[in-house]
Amino acid sequence: MSPAAGTSTVQTATTTRAPSGEVGSTRAAPVDAALERTLADVVATEAALLDAGRFGDWLALFTDDGRYWVPLQGAAQVDPIGHNSLAYEDRMLLTLRVERLKNPRAHSQQPRSRCQHVLQRSMRVDASDGDDRAHELRTPFLYVESRDGEQVLLTGLYRHWLVNVEGAWKIRLKRVDLLDADRPLPAIQLFI
Amino acid sequence: MTGFAVPAAHGVAGATRFAIDALVEDDRVHRDLYLSEELFALEQQHFFATTWSYLGHTSQVPSSGDYLTVEIAGRPLVMVRQPDGAIRVLFNRCAHKGTRLVSEASGNVGRHFRCPYHAWTYRLDGAPMGMPLKAGYDGTQLATCESGRGMIALRHVAVYRDFVFVKLADAGPSFDDYFGDVLRAIDNMVDRSPEGRLAIDGGVLRNVIRCNWKIYLENINDTVHPMSTHQSAVDAAHGLWKDQPADAPKPMAMEQILPFGAGYDFFDRMGGRAYPNGHSVLGIHFSIHSGYAQLPDYEAAMRAAHGAERAAEILQRSPQNAVLYPSLAVKGSPQSIRVIRPLAADRTLVEAWSLRVAGAPDVLFERTQTYNRLVFSPMSVVAHDDVHLFESIQRGLRADGNPWVSLHRDFDRSELEGGTLETNGTSELLMRNQYRAWAKAMRDGMEGR
């Protein structure tokens, strides 16, 4: 499954609503509470690794074909090709980012940027399309990136596409739907 | 920062020539050009109002009633497509109390503008149509004063191959006199379409940078910074690519990032050209964009449209940057434009737009979007070091002891004669040329010419 194909499935899930209107309550099959917690833990761990500056460990959470995507239209964006994005990166570009941050000549990291992710409870949305190894989690967030006494505050919704690879849960797609993706932004140097 | 360096002994109006000349020397400029809020206010009034600014592209308003709102030099403007297909630019202000008629970035007003406050209405060309309680104006001066004239249309609007430019004031040169031969850079972009047509597409990347707009524009012509500024991004890219055979096909991202590591000699040999009024083309012989993969189908379509010789001529030309001073920087390949909108002495909005080339394969648009995302996004690892350094300059210039910014590299007195000048790629002539144009336009603007 290509990330783009995964994305379109995610998009379909946007409109999934239970009769009560409660988001994410519609499921193809019941998922046990333990799995639910395990999936939410992946999202929480991912954020904690970023906050700790453990970017190499963070990168290892992604599948080989994993993508990190910050669409320019936020939640409204359908695909990463027809419209541009603030970031749309595969393992190669994410590795480039992580390697650059280690370089003493990364001038913009003097002083260093720091970040804090503040997550709300993740909600699982059925996006498996019959594949019980794949799940989408939606997690509202606040993100603060701080550098040299200045803070940038961003907020929005994460959509993690998680797949089980040989017993371990991995991120195939981390989509970051910013509330204000279209506004002028200062430099965002770490990972939202 | 209050006041600028040279005391206006004869009052602002009388001493302006002296004051402006004292800030711009032949080979260096005073820091107040970047720091002074007072000078920024004078620029808005005299420089940006009397020179031609890029506003937008006609493809952004395809149908009658489509509009695009933009602020230029602090003035709210609206570009609107007319029923007959023409483009008009109006001040986005109700003639009554000053409400903006439209407040979205873009949209469609239908057949007329209607003020949301008191329902005054205007035709798409700005002419007044009506208002409630019309009888209440009988016998008043409304019809004969400014408020009776409707929305004010800009008198100086030029649409050049679908790129729309405006000049706010009556003073200043005509469009053709102002831009002259640098318009060939726009020609090259449009000629790269087998159908002769471009369209803005895929959204805009917007950056707000805490530096003066001149620092950003200088850097567009700065070929000596990539080696040191972008070392971390280039090192990381090389680290990922070093084990590949030399002829391995590069992913598009690698193809675009690796050339930032080119050496001083490469940038020096690419050459540059300075035009009157501050415009420039950098990379007149080649550039970091020259090595992108060939696209046989596209090149065949270009030959079919233009003939083999002309197609080769168009495609061979891919400068690093052309600057249509002071608001627009364009790249023909990738089809990317940057729009520079000064917000304050220490704050600049930079927008990166992508152009879709009619009659070209999707991969060309993908190349443009990828380049803009990798290099001009607020999340760009290439731009992070640029932005940090621009903001660093804005703070460092407050130091005592040296109030000057050096632009001495390869200065040659003969360049003071002006005209169109060719130079080596690492000369700072293209920057000196911007400041000579700035000083001239400021003087002319202040003296009402």
Image (cartoon, rainbow, N blue to C red):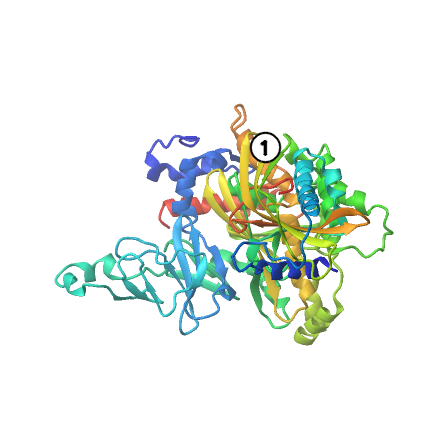
Where is residue B13 drawn, in percent x and y? 33, 40
In the depicted structure, whether residue B327 falls above or below residue B264: below
User: Which quarter of the rendering shows the N terminus of chain B?
Assistant: top left
Where is residue B274 drawn, in percent x and y? 58, 50
Question: Residue tagged by mark 1?
Answer: A147
Image quadrant in which you'd find residue B144? bottom left
Count of labels in the image: 1
Give the residue at x 73% y 71%: B297
Q: Secondary structure at mark 1?
A: strand
Binning the other alpha carbons within 10 Å of mark 1 as few (below 14), some (14 to 19) or many (20 upward) gives: some
Q: Please state which of residues A37 and B40 is positioned toward the viewer in this rendering.
A: A37
Give the residue at x 53% y 60%: A19
Visible in this render: residue B121? yes
- Residue at the extreme bottom: B304
In the depicted structure, whether residue A6 falls above or below residue B124: above
Where is residue B346 drawn, in percent x and y? 49, 37
Where is residue B26 drawn, in percent x and y? 54, 38
User: What's under tag 1, amino acid-wise?
Assistant: Arg
